[in-house]
Each structure stands twice: as C-alpha cells, then as structure tokens.
Amino acid sequence: MTELGNRLKEAREAKGYGLDDLQRITKIQKRYLIGIEEGSYDAMPGKFYVRAFIKQYCEAVGLPPEVIFEEHKEEIPTTYEDEIPVSLSRVQTRKSVSESSTRVFDFVPKLLIALFVIGALIAVWVFWQGKVGDKAPETQPSENQQQVDVDENQTAESEEPEEETKDKNETESKSSEDENAKEDKEQKPEQSLEAVNSSDYKTTYELKNAEEFKLQLSAKGDTWVKVFNTDEQVLFEGLLKQDNKKDFDFSGEKQAYLIIGDASNTDISVNGKKLEYKISATDVVRQDIIINYEPQSAQ
C-alpha cells in the first residue's frame, strides 16, 4: 500500500465508512476504490479517471483534493499524454481549413472570366434583337384577329369572379387551419428540460411536458459511462469509443442517473434534443447527471 492509499484509507475508517459505503456514496466501483488504496491503477479506464476518482474519494472522506494532489503528486499519474492527440487534431484542422481557402481563391478568377464572357454574349444578343425589331414592318391586325382578342377579353372577364371566389375560399381555409394549429400548440406545451440543482460535479434536471423519456449517449471521443435506473440497477457500464452511441428508454422510470467519465467527449440527448451541461464540461471532466421524469399524463 502506498503512502497516499494509506492516508485515504485512514480517513475513510475515521469516517466509519466501509468500502461498500464509499461505493454507494461515490458511485465508484469497489474494485477501483481498492485499487486507489493499494496504489494499483492498471485496472482504471485511463489516467484522467484515476485523478477524477481520487478527487471524489477525497471529497467523500473530507480531505482537500488540491492539497492531496500537491503532497502526493509523485504517486498520482498525470494526464499530459492523454492531451497530445487533442493538440495534434487541432493542428490538422487548421491545416485543412488553410488548404480549402487556397482552392477557393484559385477558383474565383476563373468564375469571374466565365461571368464576363456570358454577360458579353447576352449584350450582343439584345443589341441584335433591337436592330431586327426596328426593321420589322408594322401591320394592322386583321378583322379576325380583332374578333379573337374581343372573345378572349370577354372570357377573361367572365372567369375573374370565379378565380376570386376560389382564392377567397382558399384563404379562409388556410386561415382556419392556422387557427386550429395555433390552438393545438397552445393546448400542448413543449417539452422542457431544466437544471434545478447543481453543485461541484453533480447536476439535477427535471424533464416536463414529455410523453416519453428516451435517452441517447453519443461519444465524441473515448469516454467511460455508467447508467442507473430508478431502483439503482446498473443498465450499462463501460467505455464508449469515439462515434459510438448507446440508447435507453426510461419512459417507465421516474429517474435516470448517469455517471459521465469525460463530459467533454459525451453528448446527452433527451427525446432527440441535446442536453446542455450546467457545469462546464471542460472545467469539470467527471460529472454526475440526474434526470427526474414525470409523464405528461400524470401532470
């Protein structure tokens, strides 16, 4: 057992907590708690999880995490290696943007030349049509043509009232549909998902005006997650790789409890709408998200 592990264990025993008690308080698996006390971090999902679990352990037993990290920094692994891929991806993104801009600027002169040629051709055509029109002989409309024009005018005048009546009916029908849609919208309030409580790494949300509760976790990078239902039954626990998704249906539950190992790499969607983290995902990596749900029919 390391000096850090021994100190944490003594603080836990001073609080009167067993490992099972600490597992229930922190939602961290018992085998990980034992690994922290014994200084064995190989079983952890990653280095940044080690630091997050130690921080939560300290808070649970009343030790200041900042002081512990400073006094035992030689025993706690750093996360510098985990940050290197992020830096590299940013450099590659800037390079791709620069190459795309260069190709756009190369294409602009060609586009301008093509537009100039098309404009010149249109100008020549208009000029030629004007000259031909000036030379065309003026002719008087024949008697038959005059009669056809009169008949067409009379037909148009007789059809105008019918078209006006049709347009009026369509306008009234559309107005009635808009009013019905407005009434339906007023009768059915939109779904709301609001944060009602937030402290340290834990945030509680309330889902209202929803007929169902379907939740999806999407990984933008590697992230460890754990999902509980109302009865604290574990529905999923493990590492989600980049671009992986996990769907859950909590429509028959009153609560969903999520432990997010890396919030900056994890998107949470409720009924197709993205949840906004109340606590900054870049400032606090490990977060607990609690979503309380009451079906619309029960409200």
Image: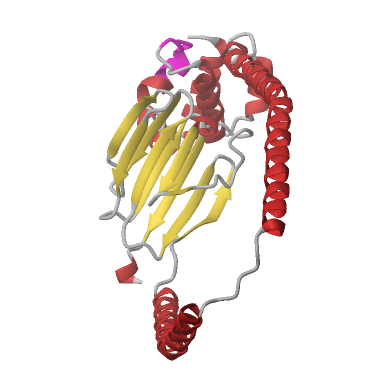
Q: Which residue is depicted at the point 49% across and 51% down? A: 204
Quadrant location, the C terminus = bottom left
The percent coordinates of residue 294 (x first, y second) are 35, 62
- Left or right of 164 on screen, residue 106: right
For the view shown, which residue lies furthest in the left direction?
Answer: 252
Q: Which residues are magenta?
A: 34-42
Answer whether residue 272 is magenta in the image: no
Residue 281 appears anywhere in the view? yes
Choose between 98 and 164: the one closer to the eye: 164
Above or below: residue 110 compared with residue 214: above
Instruction: Give the image location of residue 10, x and y in percent.
Output: 51, 23
Tell me which corner region of the image, top left, top right, bottom left or bottom right, holds residue 91.
Answer: top right
Q: Is residue 109 above or below residue 298?
A: above
Query: Where 130 sits versus 289, above or below?
Result: below
Q: Position of residue 171 (x, y in %)?
A: 45, 82
Q: Nearer the viewer, residue 182 or 140?
A: 140
| In-front residue for pair 58/175 | 175
